[in-house]
Amino acid sequence: SVFAAAAELRNDQSFCASVGRSIALPDFLPFGGPLKEATTVDGFFSRFTQAVSRDTNSVSQSLFVEDSTAYFSAKRRIPPSVSPAQVDGFMIGIWITFLHEALDFRWDPSSVLVRMCDPAVLPQEFHGIRAIRSNERGFSIRFPAAWLAIPLNGDVSPEPTDDLVAAQLDMQAPRGFVEAIQAILRKHISDADLNVDKAAELCGFSKSALTRRLAKFDLT
């Protein structure tokens, strides 16, 4: 495929996923116009899956919620003749970056699980998420259903928390966040260049966003 050839040419197995990180779907896709009208994460996913169903019949895209968990998946209706790893890496690069930017300081990588045919095509410590191997028929991204209500208003500055109800505060400072950060940094504790900026990058945050999240746990 073109994606596999590009990765081979660059001698970089994570090249396509890295390219996907820079893609804005409303501008990239020919049917991207309606995506710009979405006001929530849920609305964006819903508009995308509806548009894809009208545009192609080779891949089905779906979003469903089970209890407190949301699943976004892509399934190929025809078995691929070549490995789709780089194609999947490209798309996962797009979607994980979309979620990361939409959540901003509420991002919790320990709550995300990606299933794909070859996790090795993702960049190391890709926003702190975990990816496991699946088959070549598609990929899926699991994340908290509460994230679907996050507004897409283009404002990435943190919300004031004084007036938020307890449930919202719990969503912004989820259990497991500190443990996830510790697990990521523990792998790099011996790196000579490890500093605050590098630590924030490894965890998928800006320095200021990571500082705000840790402050909720009285940590720096």
Image (cartoon, helix red, strand yellow):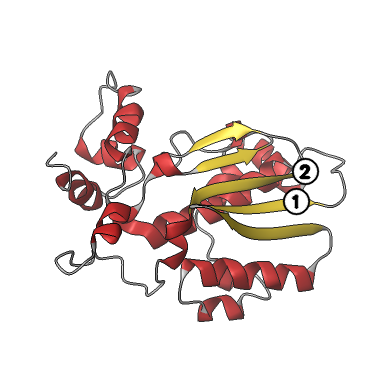
Q: Is residue 163 left or right of residue 5?
A: left
Nearest the viewer among 105 and 147 is 147
Q: Residue 46, percent across and down?
A: 60, 69
Mark 1 surroundings within 10 Å by alpha-carbon count, few (fewer than 14), some (14 through 19), many (20 or more): some
Q: Is residue 5 left or right of residue 169?
A: right
The residue positioned 29% from the left and 29% from the top of the image is 182
* Residue indicated by mark 1: 75
Mark 2 surroundings within 10 Å by alpha-carbon count, few (fewer than 14), some (14 through 19), many (20 or more): some
Q: Circle 2 sits in a helix, a strand or a loop, which is it?
A: loop
Q: CA distance from mark 2 to mark 1?
A: 6 Å
Give above or below for 112 relative to 159: above
Q: Residue 49, percent across and down?
A: 67, 66
The residue positioned 48% from the left and 59% from the top of the image is 98
Asked whether the residues under the numbered discs 2 and 1 touch, taking CB atoms below 8 Å apart as contact, a structural biologist would say yes
Q: Is residue 60 left or right of residue 212?
A: right
Nearest the viewer among 6 and 86 is 86
Figure quadrant of residue 33: bottom right
Give the residue type at disc 2.
Answer: Arg
Q: Is residue 134 left or right of residue 173?
A: right
Circle nearer the N terminus (2, 1): 1
Q: Residue 36, percent across and down?
A: 52, 78
Is residue 28 in view? no
* Residue indicated by mark 2: 137
Q: Circle 1 sits in a helix, a strand or a loop, which is it?
A: strand
